Image (tube, rainbow, N blue to C red):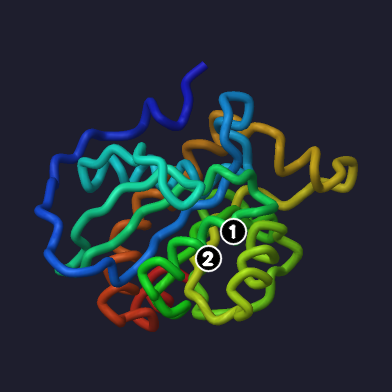
Amino acid sequence: MSNLFDLFRKISSEQSVPSGPVTHIVAGLGNPGDKYIYTRHNAGFMAMDYLAQKYNLKINKLRFKSLCAETAVNGKRVLFMKPQTFMNLSGEAVREAADFYKIPSENIIIIYDDVSFEPGTMRIKRKGSAGGHNGIKNIILEMNTDVFPRIKLGVGVKPKEYDMVGWVLGKLTPEGQKELFTCLEKTPEAIELIVSGNTDKAMNLFN
């Protein structure tokens, strides 16, 4: 069966990392382990894997309870993170990195799955409640704020016959993977706009 990563295109855009401190964090949420690959709840990890292709990175350095890499995004030094705490404790990893680099919440971009929208749908927000998402709930708890930009990736509205855990830990169909990929292609531009202070433009383009 074909999978999402068969669609990834190797894009060589390696950039030198600027000197100075990290100013922004981009964290994609998910659960570590092979059994969670391609599950709806791992849309954030899939986005990070696409970004790794885009920026020619290996997100594999273990720091802050996460797999990490640093790169340049529009002249800013940005830390990319895949928290390894499992979804419900994602905030522990994000808070450790934010505390270390003294990064304000407004400069922390979270990418994650959303069951309110069908695959292929992206929503960008500056702030907001967890909306029932346990990873976001833990980030709000650990950071003591809900003011951080987020990129939400639709993974399909839960059918009535599924419970929520079963749905988000279920795997996307090949068609769903292709539809999600259309969102992943947009994430680099969305991140570049947000990092550059153009969140409103990102929202207008992609919401």
Location of mark 2 (residue): 95
Q: Which residue is drawn at 27% across and 66% down?
A: 22
In front of the other: 18 or 168: 18
In front of the other: 138 or 133: 138
Q: In this view, does 107 lie above or below 90?
A: below
State the image coordinates of residue 110 (x, y, percent, origin top left): 49, 63
Q: Which residue is drawn at 50% across and 76% down?
A: 148
State the image coordinates of residue 103 (x, y, percent, origin top left): 39, 75
State the image coordinates of residue 196 (x, y, percent, origin top left): 25, 77
Q: Is residue 39 above or below residue 109?
A: above
> Across the whole image, how many numbered discs are drawn on residues?
2
Location of mark 1 (residue): 92
Q: In this view, does 143 lie above or below 40?
A: below
State the image coordinates of residue 80 (x, y, percent, origin top left): 36, 54
Q: Which amino acid does label 2 sit on?
A: Arg
Which SS class for mark 2? helix
Which SS class for mark 1? helix
Q: How crowded is mark 2: few (under 14 residues within 10 Å), some or many (20 or more)?
A: many
Q: What residue type is labelled 1?
A: Glu
Q: Which residue is drawn at 40% across and 30% down?
A: 5
Q: Is residue 5 left or right of residue 72?
A: right
Q: How crowded is mark 1: few (under 14 residues within 10 Å), some or many (20 or more)?
A: many
Q: Can residue 182 be seen in this view?
A: no
Q: Is residue 75 above or below residue 62?
A: below
View extreme (top): residue: 1
Q: In this view, does 70 lie to the left or right of 80?
A: left
Marks 2/1 in contact by CB < 8 Å: the verdict is yes
Mark 2 and mark 1: span between their CA atoms?
5 Å
Q: In this view, does 154 lie to the left or right of 131?
A: left
Q: Residue at x 37, y 79 (%)?
A: 199
Q: Can residue 73 be seen in this view?
A: yes
Q: Is residue 106 left or right of residue 163?
A: left
